[in-house]
Amino acid sequence: MIDVHARLDALIESGRETEAALVSTRLHPQRLVEGADPSGLVRVRWEGEEVTLEVSDGWERTLPAEELNGAVIAAMTDALSRRYDETTLRTGDEIIESPAVIPPQLDLKPFTTDPAFAAAIRRPDFPERLHALIAETERRTALRQSGRGPAGIVTARLGHDGAVTALLVDAGQAEGRRGADISRDGAAAIADARRHAAGTDDTTRPLSATEAIEVLNA
């Protein structure tokens, strides 16, 4: 027997944690750090919260397309390592944090007073509808943490704090492209991911309590 209220509470709490993470404590801005892959053809620059991917034109003369993603990962890893070292130098062993901003609490009233929710619980397919609601919430959460450039070359992924954690390159889309084109697509992918993370897109923002009930009754 599914504990309906427990699952809903967990679902709501998960949404709260995701939103809280996006506005949670951040490290103080760092100076510019730069990482590169072993070939030096791919660089990732990181200054404060701004991340820039730079791929040199003529990269295909040295790197096969299928190895470009590995080079980007290597440059990103190098930049992250240098950023960590820079943070350690600035703060010592203690991470300096700012007071967390508490997001508005989700209105739970619809779940306890809306007749539509009472009707949803009585439906014979309620367990399936609850799973659908969980799947939709997870889908939206995943989308809020990723973005893709318009050319489909680069995908950017964000952590729960909104910082860029990965840049991934599609070898098939990158083949034959100039380094400048890949770099621009990387910038667009990061911007797309941050737009999703802001929760302003109707397809990715968290569901309201009323919308969650609508999913249960679909």
Image (tube, grey):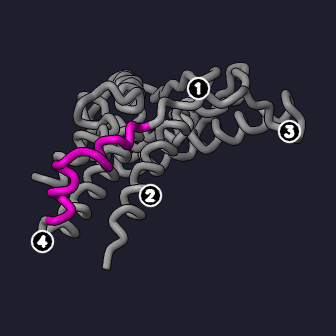
Q: Amino acid at mark 3?
A: Glu
Indicate which disc residue 124 carries. Answer: 4
| Residue at image coords 36%, 51% | 66
Q: Position of residue 73 (x, y in %)?
A: 51, 46
Q: Secondary structure at mark 2?
A: helix
Tell which circle, 3 or 1, labels the residue nearer the N-terminal end.
Answer: 1
Q: What span is in magenta?
A: 106-122
Whole-Å distance between the Cαs marked 4 and 3?
Answer: 53 Å
Location of mark 1 (residue): 45
Q: Position of residue 160 (x, y in %)?
A: 52, 41
Residue sticking out furthest to the right: 92
Q: Secondary structure at mark 1?
A: strand
Tell which circle, 4 or 2, labels the residue nearer the N-terminal end.
Answer: 2
Q: Nearer the viewer, mark 4 or mark 2?
A: 4
Indicate which disc residue 10 carries. Answer: 2
Q: Nearer the viewer, mark 4 or mark 1?
A: 4
Q: Nearer the viewer, mark 4 or mark 3?
A: 4
| Residue at image coords 36%, 30% | 199
Q: Few, some or many C-alpha atoms within 10 Å of disc 2 (few <14, some 14-19, many ≥20)?
A: few
Please, what is the dominant secondary structure of the magenta stretch? helix
Left or right: 75 as drawn, with respect to 197? right
Q: Secondary structure at mark 3?
A: loop
Q: Few, some or many C-alpha atoms within 10 Å of disc 4 (few <14, some 14-19, many ≥20)?
A: few
